[in-house]
Amino acid sequence: LGGLCYGNLQSNYKSNYDRFIKKYFDKKCGGEYTRVDKRLSQLGGLYGAVRSELVHKYLLTGKGFIGTYSPVTLKCAIIYTPGQVPEIQFAVKEYCEHFKCAFGRYYNDLIVMKDVHLVENFNKAVRRANLT
């Protein structure tokens, strides 16, 4: 979604991801995803330590744990506690809810509000990727 939002599906993956998280996840979550991203910076941030691990390996390597849900309400579905086991916890249900909310905001900006920059970026990304 970051590539569509910022007009490029072929490069700038981390930058597009980070900006999408900041703009659409953090609105609902009070900046918590950005805070966790900064804390994970030595491991590649959320992009390197979580997103890439899940996309390319289908799991969190090292001291990571993926759980279905959290028994408490989370502002960020990714918890990083260095030195503990597990260091990274990923709550699937909460992340899904945050993702749906972020996607809904993006969809509203793109389709309902017809944000000119988002429409241009979406079209540019699709053209560059030859998806039409």
Image (cartoon, helix red, strand yellow):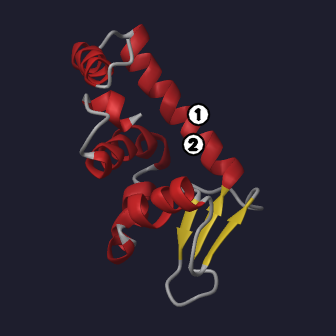
Tag 2: amino acid? His
Q: Mark 2 Cα within 10 Å, few/some/many (few <14, many 20+)?
A: many
Residue at 26% in and 32% down: 8
| Secondary structure under the numbered disc 2 in the rendered image | helix
| Secondary structure under the numbered disc 1 in the rendered image | helix
Q: Nearer the viewer, residue 30 or 55?
A: 55
Report which quarter residue 96 is drawn in: top right
Q: Which mark is residue 100?
A: 1
Report which quarter residue 124 is drawn in: top left
The picture places residue 29, in percent across and down from the top left corner, at: 49, 48
How many numbered circles does the render carry? Answer: 2
Residue for badge 2: 98
In this rendering, the answer to whether 10 lies above or below 74 is: above
In this rendering, the answer to whether 24 lies above or below 71 is: above
In this rendering, the answer to whether 86 lies above or below 107 is: below
Please state if 127 lies on the left or on the right of 103 as rendered: left
Q: Quadrant of the C terminus?
A: top left
Q: Nearer the viewer, residue 124 or 67?
A: 124
Report which quarter residue 11 is drawn in: top left
Residue contact between numbered discs 1 and 2, judged by CB atoms under 8 Å: yes
The picture places residue 130, in percent across and down from the top left corner, at: 33, 19
Q: Quadrant of the N terminus?
A: top left
Q: Mark 1 Cα within 10 Å, few/some/many (few <14, many 20+)?
A: few
Tag 1: amino acid? Lys
Please state if 40 lies on the left or on the right of 91 as rendered: left
The picture places residue 74, in percent across and down from the top left corner, at: 62, 57
Residue that extends furthest to the bottom in the rendered view of this protein:
83
Q: Tell me how far mark 1 sits from mark 2, CA to CA.
A: 6 Å
Q: Nearer the viewer, residue 28 or 115?
A: 115
Residue at 75% in and 56% down: 69
The picture places residue 97, in percent across and down from the top left corner, at: 63, 40
Residue at 59% in and 81% down: 63
